[in-house]
Amino acid sequence: MREVSVFNIGGSEVERLNLNEKIFSGKVNKILLSEVILMYQANKRMGLASTKTRAKVRGGGRKPWRQKGTGRARVGSIRSPLWRGGGIVFGPHPRDYSYYLPKKARRQALLSALNLKFNEKHFLVIDKISLSRIKTKDFMKILKNISNIVKNFDEIANKSKEILKPKKIIRFLFIVENRDKNLMLSSRNLGSVNIVLENNLNALDVLLHDYLIFSKQALENFVKNFNLG
């Protein structure tokens, strides 16, 4: 049975939690992860690049000069693609880049991402993540305590200097069970922190952050509601 330590917001270990081995098996399918991440990135792509064909460029309805007798090259419109200011041939037009892989593939990719973080010891559980008021300073105190836990984890994994690199921004993803207004507003000004609900978690969110911080209730809900089918 795989276990994970549960900490309080002060940074002290309070209990050990058994994990479902069907979900936290330790297996990571990197090929599937790559395919699913590519899908999420494609779905974020706007595809707004646009050019005008000769039919859409303003003007050019009159033939510039007669067909024969001038000695000049024949031309029917000043908006010909051959002319400066004319239409564009085979230029980009707005398009939808989105596509979807099967739901089972997306679920398995999420499991692979979670197991990758668990194997790297970048997976933490806090007994309860909440604030009594909207105050970024209060949230920073929680973050500081979590950073100390992370530092200890890195020392165990022989990466003690990673958290202390001056130019490296450590990104934290907090996974909570419900939308806490105080928590959301206190953390929204911090570029290295994001908060998501456990039922909205996806593989891209997991891999874009260095550390996952689950609330105990959110982890229990996730394991209970996750469909292994």
Image: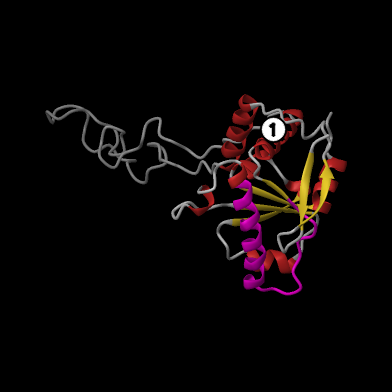
Dot 1 falls on a residue whose secondary structure is helix
- Residue 146 x, y percent position in the rendering: 66, 57
The image quadrant that residue 114 belongs to is top right
- Determine if the magenta segment contains residue 137: yes
Q: Main secondary structure of the magenta part?
A: helix
> What is the crowding at mark 1: few (fewer than 14 residues within 10 Å), some, or many (at least 20)?
many
Quadrant the N terminus occupies: top right
- Residue 52 x, y percent position in the rendering: 40, 40
Between 189 and 44, the one nearer to me in the picture: 189
Q: Is residue 213 visible?
A: yes
Going by the numbered disc 1, the residue's amino acid type is Ser
- Residue 170 x, y percent position in the rendering: 55, 52
Q: Is residue 106 left or right of residue 222?
A: left
Question: What residue is rendered at 82% in x and 47% in y?
Answer: 16
Between 45 and 180, the one nearer to me in the picture: 180
Quadrant the C terminus occupies: top right
Q: How many marks?
A: 1
Q: Is residue 201 left or right of residue 71?
A: right
In the displayed structure, 38 sits above or below 206; it is above
Q: Is residue 72 left or right of residue 176?
A: left
- Residue 61 x, y percent position in the rendering: 34, 41
Question: What residue is rendered at 25% in x and 40% in y?
Answer: 84
Return the residue at label 1.
112
Q: Is residue 155 left or right of residue 85?
A: right
Q: Is residue 209 visible?
A: no
In the displayed structure, 147 sits above or below 63; it is below
- Determine if the magenta segment contains residue 209: no
Q: Which residues are magenta?
A: 125-154
Question: What colour scheme was applied to this rendering of the protein?
Answer: secondary structure
